[in-house]
Image (cartoon, rainbow, N blue to C red):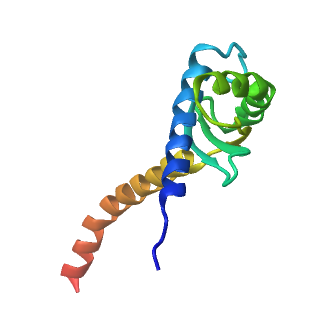
Amino acid sequence: MTVNNKGFARRDRISEQIRRELAELIQTELKDPRVGMISITGVEVSADYAHAKVYFSSMSGREHVDSVLAGLQKAAGFLRHELGRRITIHNTPQLHFVFDESLERGADLSKLIQQAVSISGELEPADSSDSTES
């Protein structure tokens, strides 16, 4: 039995093209001050190309995510229209924006690891002196 990955490869290419084009459109064409500095971290296109989940991260922090999301949702029609002009695809997908927490979670984990290492460094000398006294 042969597995056909051609559909997945095409969908991946289209997802990546949509990600690049949206990143450029948001940076150069979008004037909504609520959106600010965001990164498009990924795009997942549905099998029928009718919908695209657009994952984004924001430099303005978690407390402003609702505002950024509102700005992106308001601009979705404009972004979809411009996207349709830039890429060659039969139907331009509806855009659904989703906050990507992975970068923020990664930063939190790095901070926790750093704290654990510094605490471990403070405890090591005390532990080694206790073991020599026994």
Q: Nearer the viewer, residue 101 or 85?
A: 85
Q: Is residue 134 left or right of residue 5?
A: left
> On the image, which quarter does residue 126 sit in?
bottom left
Horizontal and vertical percent for residue 93? 71, 39
Give the total of numbered labels: 0
Q: Is residue 133 left or right of residue 33?
A: left
Residue 71 shows in the view: no
Horizontal and vertical percent for residue 76? 76, 29
Q: Residue at x 76, y 24 (%)?
A: 75
Image: 106 above or below 122: above
Residue 109 shows in the view: yes
**In the picture, which quadrant includes the C terminus?**
bottom left
Horizontal and vertical percent for residue 62? 67, 39
Q: Nearer the viewer, residue 26 or 51?
A: 51
Q: Residue at x 35, y 63 (%)?
A: 120
Image: 13 above or below 92: below
Q: Nearer the viewer, residue 55 or 8?
A: 8
* Residue found at the very far left of the displayed protein: 132
Q: Residue at x 55, y 51 (%)?
A: 105
Horizontal and vertical percent for residue 60? 62, 29
Q: Residue at x 22, y 73 (%)?
A: 129
Q: Nearer the viewer, residue 20 or 69?
A: 20
